[in-house]
Image (tube, coloured by chain):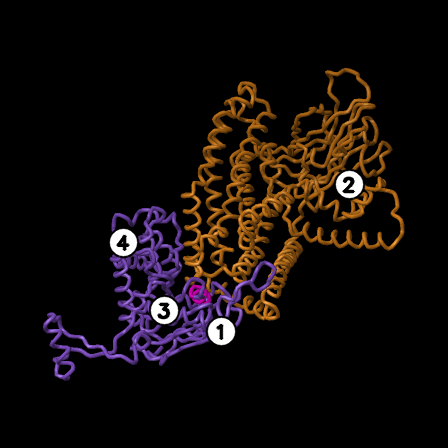
Chain colours: A orange, B purple
Amino acid sequence: MYFDPNEYLLNPYISFLNWAVVVGCLTFVVLFISMVNLVATRGANGIGIFFDELGEMTADLFHLSPRRIWALTRLTYTEAIRRKALSVFVVFGLLFMFAGWFMGDSKEIKPDQVKVYISFVLTTISWLTLPVVLILCCFGIPEDIRLRSIHTVVTKPARRVEIVLGRMIGIWLIGCLVLAVMAVVGHFWIVRQIPAESQPLLTCRVPVYGTNIEFLDREGNFARSGVNVGDIWAFRSYIEGATKARAIWTFRNVDESSLDSDGNLNFENSFSAFRSYKGDMTRPLFYDIKLFNPAKNLAYTTDPQPVNEFRHKLDKIPRKVTVDNVQYDILKDFVNEKRELNVEVSCIDREQYIGMARSDLFIRMPDRPFWMGYWKAVLGIALTLLLITMIGVSASTMVKGPIAAVLTFVIYFLSLKDNHQFMDQLVFGQVQGGGFLESIYRLVMHMGPSQELPANPAFTVVKFFDWTLNNFLWLCRHVIPYSQYFNMPEFVSNGFDVPWETSILPSLLVTAAFIIPCVVMGYFALRIRELESK
Amino acid sequence: MSQSENVIEIRNLSKVYRDFWGRPKVRALNALSLDIKKGEVFGLLGPNGSGKTTTLKLLLGLLFPTEGEVKILGKSAADVSKNERIGYLPEESYLYRFLNAYETLDFYGRLFNMTAAQRKERSEKLLDLVKLAPQSRRRQLKEYSKGMTRRIGVAQALINDPDLVMLDEPTSGLDPLGNRDMKDLILDLKAQGKTVLMCSHLLADVQDVCDRIAILYGGELKVMGRVDELLKAQDETQIRSSKLSDAALKEVQEVLKRHDANVINIDQPTASLEDLFLKTVQESRERPGHRNVIDRQSVT
């Protein structure tokens, strides 16, 4: 597994405050744009109209009718079905009818193949449902305006907020229907593809990761990282064998629930090995795990364990351990008052190296059934659908369908992990070569990124322009959601349960954060524009 | 609301359509002022592009006025709560074509927060009222003829038993029988004390059902008043009698000369509304800015 779930230490007060600030800022941006639009279209009266509309919207919130919202939801739902949105099942059916042909011999199931099966199913479902929802949410309201059928709705007591909410819920429901059917079929397909003897590979492990990883160098001093063995990808750091080099983890919240049914504390690792000499290639490298409690000056070290290269390795440590003929209880004697457990790993083989990252060692809690993780991943897709629906519907209240679709797609594309991280790099100045104009200048003039720009007023202007653009990018970076939170299928395909704190909760909060600004945007867009097809 | 209260008040209403850059493109309505009282059937007439539908859309809040003010049922056009008491039939029956007749009425009924029982009862009643054949009621609207779509459009406009009904070209697309039904329906609404505002090109229909009319041309109000008064020819006398033979007619003429005939009816003859309409349009072309508003603001 090559992804490193971030620590998400939930401080309810700070988290809520941050969330409220983001929602508030987003809503403020939406309201500001609405006011500017009104001033541009209605002149000086625009400001007065804006505040009137703000009052109307607040009043509307107290007059929301679930029956009207449900009516619009049903309308959207019926419209989608009768316009043959469900024909996406034909593509789905075709894919699953023949997918087994191209995905290996089912008699030789390996863990990686299981990963491919799960990944295929969940990715296919995502790729089929997202475009359907994208099209439905971006074309519904513009089509209503084009055909003027919206005239018969807005001339009834239906509030604009209700229209927006009804559309959003209706489209999301149809997306969820498609998703649910595909997910059920996909689940059966996965189980059916994997023979009975390989079914245990369908796991849903519950990891508890260390809060941090620290390294000691060969002299036993704290180091920022281990040894770089020449790997261009610095995800893992290596510790040298038969020296004082160590990797140290601190696990929090270790208690009874961390033990399995036999009372063992299970550590699972995916360490990698690096050999500085060939030696006996059939002999694995060895490591040991040391539990220690500095407060009691107590340590317990396991027997040497072989590194299971390219695979996971499970080490069971019994709750009762013996040190110097004295029996200790791990939970009582090694876990400190803060319910923290310190763990140290060392490499035993001289001049050989073992590589590790924070996520390469975790406490494996009792496994959950596979279906639980699978359906959590489906929930992740459903939340993505909801997010796209909200953005798409609110965009479609302002612009025509194709433009709304492109806009929503671009926002979704930018929200993807790599793109969002690239935005981070740009915003926080981690990319060399300057901003937009400066980098163009450097390209044209064949200047290296580290070369100083000439000091003259023109470049001051260029830098100011780039600075302004960078600030706009900063705003975009904060407004565009980070879809990695929603990427729950990645956990499941790697055989893990979807964690609440690092994935489900953030994705729920991100989704909730978008509801208010999207509804406000939709309301204003439908109120301040004339609902005529132009 | 008493009988003499204004259901609609329009003051100095203007609408200028603008292009993408905000430059004025068309002045669709210019300083329109009129009142419509409770219980009357008011007809808005005019050639294409005269501003009839624009007026209706401004009243409904679908368009925003450039200048002027609108009060409808005592509320502003932007106030959504006014819609509780309004029924609107758009020009082209812009309905959801994938729904059938029952689903359509059920949907609009829900928008008025009607209960399931109310919706069911009202739907049956209205579908009978607009005479939509029972075998057509479960078919999707996309399979309907224009006349059938018009009928279901009327039914949705009446789903909430409105006090004010706004009909844009209500007889458009209807056959003569449907046309008659529609006119009967409008008269029936009037008999129930409802206020009806209708736009139409079919002048005979307007003449048959409207109490008062206004003729718009180029976005300006040209003529407004009671239909019967507008159509009266002031300098002629009309004599109506039973059918006479040629010989008798000759005699009648003689008798008339001697002022000794058995006169059954003597009245001022009326021109057709079409004549008035065409005359108004012609005059408007020849004398821009001229107005001939004869409005006594009375309701029969």
Query: Looking at the image, is mark 4 or mark 2 nearer the viewer?
Result: 4
* Residue annotated with mark 2: A294
* Residue annotated with mark 3: B277
User: What residue is drawn where x is 55% and y is 23%?
Assistant: A103
Q: Are marks 3 and 1 on the same chain?
A: yes
Relative depth, front residue between B270 and A238: B270
Please indicate whether residue A329 sits to the left or right of residue A176 in the image: right
Please indicate whether residue A282 sits to the left or right of residue A497 in the image: right
Query: Looking at the image, is mark 2 or mark 3 nearer the viewer?
Result: 3
Q: Residues within 10 Å of mark 2 (few under 14, many from 20)?
A: few
* Residue annotated with mark 1: B31
Q: Residues within 10 Å of mark 4 (few under 14, many from 20)?
A: some
Q: Is residue A246 above or below residue B27?
A: above
The CA span between labels 3 and 1 is: 21 Å
* Mark found first going from the N terminus, 3 or 1: 1
Part of the protein shown in magenta: B52-58
| Quarter occupied by the N terminus of chain A | top right
Q: Are marks 3 and 4 on the same chain?
A: yes
Q: Are marks 4 and 1 on the same chain?
A: yes
